[in-house]
Amino acid sequence: MHYIFKNNIKKYIMSVLVNKNSKIIVQGFTGSEGTFHASQMIEYGTNVVGGVTPGKGGTQHLDRPVFNTVKDAVEQAGADTSIIFVPPAFAADAIMEAANAGIKVIICITEGIPVADMIKAYDYIKGKDCRLVGPNCPGVITPGEAKVGIMPGFVFKQGKVGIVSKSGTLTYEAADQVAKQGLGVTTAIGIGGDPIIGTTTKEAVELLMNDPETEIIIMIGEIGGQLEADAARWVKADGNRKPVVGFIAGETAPKGRTMGHAGAIVGGADDTAEAKKRIMRENGIHVVDSPAEIGKKVAEVLAVLK
């Protein structure tokens, strides 16, 4: 078993969420985005077993079978992981279809899904044995094993550093800096920046905290919401078992204005970058003030540990 259930976090063998044994399908397989990124995933060595495009079942695309439904892909190809490149108007339905078909890890890349649709999808999957990552996220990568997303695979080297991030760009930046320090990544999880997402910062940090391969965690957040504060408090309550290096983007953003991600809006005193960094420091997290300092700080903390 390579996937993780929300209520069964500690029972797994290797890696977090995805690995070389994951059987991945692409929803929206034959569209332009699905085609481009699926081909990149296949080139990386990811085990893509097919894709779903209604009405095109029984055909081939990128030398992989196309199925009419996710249920068909599960039954015929043994799919257990799905990545969604479906247009915003239909993406919530795609999430629910994957959950209903028995997919265990659902990674939704689609940006701009209506909030009302995501509320419906979020409520629907709560009772299912699955984990949703995203939407509006770059995906998940376990370097050298599986790239299930849109991240540039060459940036990520294998190692002992776990990454959790709201920002795709800063995920890549952190991975690049880690590599420049001669280190590498266990799994990087891009959780997405929408107001309603499946896996929270705290849940993603918890997955990496319980992963025996991960020695240190990078947690990248941004203004708006309470996700980083909740994660920081959980890290301390959990006994600070592994060091966490944190960064919060959006320090210069004007209050009350959405910046970049739909979830990045300061609604209260604890939503600002300064407040989040203070809470993180109070809970034992090694906070840096610039993304340029992430790699160096990780190396410093690891050096002290050894």
Image (spheres, grey):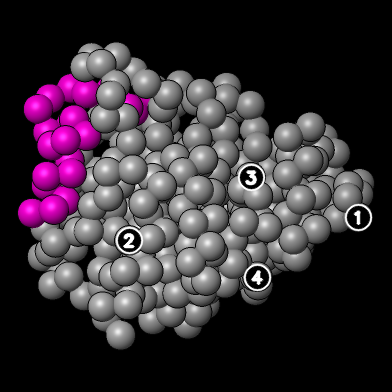
Q: Quadrant of the C terminus?
A: bottom left
**Does 9 sit left or right of 86 as displayed?**
left
Name the residue at 84% across, 44% down. 57
Label 3 near label 4: C-beta < 8 Å?
no
Q: Nearer the viewer, mark 4 or mark 2?
A: 2
Which badge, 2 or 1, comes first in the chain's sequence? 1
Which badge, 4 or 3, comes first in the chain's sequence? 4
Residue 98, x across and y down, in percent: 57, 48
Residue type, mark 4 in image:
Gly
Q: Secondary structure at mark 4?
A: loop
| Residue at the disc numbered 1 | 63
Which badge, 3 or 1, comes first in the chain's sequence? 1
Name the residue at 17% across, 70% down. 240
Q: Magenta span covers which residues?
A: 262-282
| The disc label shown at residue 156, or none | none
* Residue 263 included in the magenta stretch of the image: yes
Q: Nearer the viewer, mark 2 or mark 3?
A: 2
Name the one closer to the observer, 210 or 23: 210
Q: Residues within 10 Å of mark 1 (few under 14, many from 20)?
A: few
| Residue at the disc numbered 2 | 297
Q: Secondary structure at mark 2?
A: helix
| Residue at the disc numbered 4 | 144
The residues bearing labels 4 and 1 have C-alpha atoms spaced at a distance of: 22 Å
Residue type, mark 3 in image:
Ile
Does residue 105 show up?
no
Residue type, mark 1 in image:
Asp
Residue type, mark 2 in image:
Lys
* Residue 207 included in the magenta stretch of the image: no
Name the residue at 13% across, 37% down. 275
